[in-house]
Image (cartoon, grey):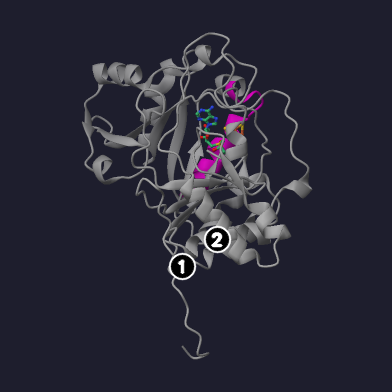
Amino acid sequence: MADGLVRVKPSPLLDTFGRQISYLRMSVTDRCDLRCTYCMAEKMTFLPKRDLLTVEEMDRVATTFIERGVRKVRITGGEPLVRKDIGDLFRRISRHLGSGLDELTLTTNGTMLSDKAQMLVDCGVNRVNVSLDALEPDQFKKITRRGDLDKVLRGIDAALDAGLKIKINTVALKHDNADTLPAMIEWAHSKGMGLTLIEVMPLGDTGEDRIDQYIPLPMVQDKLEQEWTLTPLNETLKNAGPSRYVRVEETGGKLGFITPLTNNFCAGCNRVRVTCTGRIYMCLGQDDHIDLRSALRESDAPEAALSAAIDQALFRKPEKHDFAIKRRGETPALPRHMSMTGG
Ligand code: SAM
Ligand code: SF4
């Protein structure tokens, strides 16, 4: 070493079940321009801005994780693109691409993609997930309680034109979109986009009964198989993430299933989540968390405090979640909305 110091390689992020953490999801805001019925309540009280990590603090958190072996960072929310300094965050984290970081990506509702697609491409983002649950304007407005479908469709086209690959995420809803899922899959595949179906999870009080929303995906798959041939893809086996993929032979496109309720997906979990206030949640389905913001703001040696807090979090990462939706009127499994933790 030129400066004569011996540097110790940071230890990798291994939990007590031997799972290596290589994937960080960072929620950058709890705010959103939509109010999806399965995600938020109609009237939400959002956090004061001072409680949110600054872009510099988020960069520091991401950098620490990347130095310790995280290879993929997904920016999420709330709606990440409503944050005014979001471009600055992408620019900062993008400096790690090719030196530690393999992928920087985003989950968005797509309403602001028309304006932001080029910025994302300029920051080395190759693909994004866009959440979309309907292709008919009134149905979209009902599910999002306010959204303008056209704006999202224009955003998707702008992103495709800018060269981004898109995967559509669709929450399957018993009454609001179950019948229109085949049409959505055909539409996505016709535009060269994959689509992943997600089971609704009991996170946060949204003013809706989960029993009226939840439809088990094996039931949806059975119905699709009456019309289509679904061939399991090998990558399902190597993919450590929670999705199971098939190819729809009739459309030639890829279809994913995320089934946290009918099929616990935790054995291969390789991720942790950091909220916009700097809490690290070791599991989407558990409430245990560790506060990184105090490590950042109150310690004299923030880097070391951050790393120690991350070690503590790994030690406490649970084996699995225990979601269930069983009875009408049941209170949510966790009071925290998905928009807090980041999907
Ligand atoms: N606003 C962005 C968006 O909608 O893509 C990013 C944040 S959103 C919380 C991330 C993902 O979580 C979306 O795909 C959304 O559909 C999903 N989601 C939100 N609440 C959910 C719930 N209760 N169960 C299952 N998925 C949920
Ligand atoms: Fe907003 Fe995304 Fe939640 Fe819908 S799912 S309310 S777009 S954060």
* Ligand 2 - quadrant of the structure image: top right
The part of the chain drawn in magenta is: 143-160
Relative placement, left or right, of 27 versus 156 is right
Residue 112 visible in the shown view: no
Disc 2 marks a residue whose amino acid type is Ser
Q: How busy is the neighbourhood of tag 2: few (under 14 within 10 Å), some, or many (20 plus)?
A: some
Q: Helix, strand or loop at disc 1?
A: loop
Mark 1–mark 2 CB contact (< 8 Å): yes
> Between residues 23 and 143, which one lies in front from this camera angle?
23
Is residue 147 in the magenta section? Answer: yes
> Between residues 270 and 136, which one lies in front from this camera angle?
270
The picture places residue 66, in percent across and down from the top left corner, at: 48, 62
Is residue 167 in the magenta section? Answer: no
Distance (Cα) linking label 1 and label 2: 9 Å
Residue at point 60%, 19% (across, down): 142
**Quarter of the figure with residue 56:** bottom right
Relative placement, left or right, of 103 versus 309 is left
What secondary structure predominates along the stretch shown in magenta?
helix
Relative placement, left or right, of 65 versus 250 is right
Relative to 179, residue 47 above or below: below
